[in-house]
Amino acid sequence: MTDRLPPRAVALLPLLLFLLIFLGSGIYYTVMGAEFAFYQIKAPVAILPAIILAVLLTRDTLNRTLEAFVAGVGDSNIITMALVFLLAGAFATVTEAIGGVAATVNMGLSFIPTSMVLPGLFLIGAFISTAMGTSMGTIGALVPVALGFAQVTGLSIPLAMGAVIGGAMAGDNLSIISDTTIAATRTQGVSMRDKFKLNLIIALPAMLMTLVLLFILGDTTVEPVVADYQLILVLPYVAVLVLALSGLNVLAVLMTGIVLSGLTGLFMAPEYSVATWGGDIYRGFEGMLEIMVLSMFIGGLSAIMKREGGLDWVRDRIQRIAGAIGNTGKRTGEAAIAALVSVTNLFVANNTVAIIISGSVARELAEDYAVDRRRSASLLDIFSCVIQGLIPYGAQILLAGSLASISPLALISQVYYCWILGTMAVAAIVFGFPKVKLIPN
């Protein structure tokens, strides 16, 4: 058999089954009044029936199907994601154990009014993510601090996490060194600078509106008591932020943070031993086990669905719908491109992969409907960013939820930037802004 089988919709059923079990069980236990309702059935367990269904629905041999699953689990993007999970968990645990989180929060509150905490977290997240080109490293570094701010000031923890995720996604979307920017510009054959300019025209108003909203929502009547802090305990965080801004690989940044935090603990606290340091690192690993396993399973499941023609069916269906509507102008083509990458992202749970899968078809749609290729690159990046920042089984929300010990579903409605950006992007399609002169395809 060929590696890619003919398109069919039934190949998408496994992911829908997972979402039904994952969301349905959480809603059921919420109605029943159970604590931690969405953790009664762990997500890595909820996805097992979906994997079994995918294997049963396959049109290939069992061995070849399992090979595809394992290849999906071992995809470089998935493995990198798993390593980020582990190192972020270890960094958060070690820095909290040595008192670094508390010291950073107390220092921040000495300079930042509580009403500016949420806007500040959003801006810092956007700045770091733009410099690093990755949202994951930004979330791993900032969530522990955001959690500390929320606990001390009385702010909503999901809201604080949403500010960090929103900022991280904003930077990832705009950064010229991010995987999504590289994938979008290469598949459409345009320069990063041109795509950045178009993105910024849509993203900047969304960022400003988000800042205003976070300022309003961040108004709290709780007056935090700012305790004394030791500056040396803050230095590991400062080092991580500086290294992140320098463009160092996210894995190297987090590993350096773990080492600096551990050495700081050994220097500052006689009772903090190498064995204690090692135990904290492993506790951080343990805290990330659930999302790491889930991400690997999703990678394997997505590989089977792609090989069985599920994603090809999505592509063909959107092309058919656009064709049935007829060549009514650029708006039809732009809407088809946005729908294509959005639906693909829902099924692969990775915005870079979604852009790569959708890229060639998006370029064909751009040619058919006279959509400027810079515009199609911008739409690919924006809509994949919006979906990735909102799906509860996406890496960004999973990481933030695990570090803050809250349900991923509690975060969806709190990532205001992605909701506002999505609204702005839809308005840009409907009203045709910004105006761009068509370049030859």
Image (cartoon, rainbow, N blue to C red):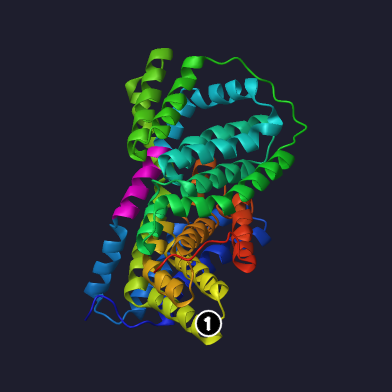
- Give how far across and how far down residue 305 sits, in percent: 37, 72
Q: Which element is circle 1 on?
A: loop
Q: Position of residue 168 (x, y in %)?
A: 51, 44
Drawn side of residue 76 relative to residue 43, left or right? left
Residue lying at 70% horizontally and 42% vertically, measured from the top left? 212
Give how far across and how far down residue 41 sits, in percent.
Answer: 51, 59
Q: Residue at x 45, y 32 (%)?
A: 93
Q: Is residue 241 above or below residue 32?
A: above
Quarter of the figure with the N terminus: bottom left
Q: Is residue 401 visible?
A: no
Residue drawn at the location 66% of the way across and 42% of the way down: 211
Majority secondary structure of the magenta segment? helix
Tell me which segment is drawn in magenta. 76-88
Q: Circle 1 is placed at which residue position?
A: 327
Label 1 Cα crowd, 10 Å radius (few <14 / some 14-19 / many 20+): some
Question: In the rendered view, does 434 fall on the left or right side of 176?
Answer: right
Membership of 84 in magenta stretch: yes
User: Which residue shows up at 48% across the image and 73% down it?
Assistant: 370
Query: How many callouts does the rendering have?
Result: 1
Amino acid residing under circle 1: Asn
Q: Residue furthest right?
A: 221
Q: Is residue 237 visible?
A: yes
| Location of residue 95 by image quarter | top left
Q: Is residue 351 found inside the magenta-colored segment of the image?
A: no
Q: Quadrant of the C terminus?
A: bottom left
> Hey, which residue is sitting farthest bottom in the picture?
324
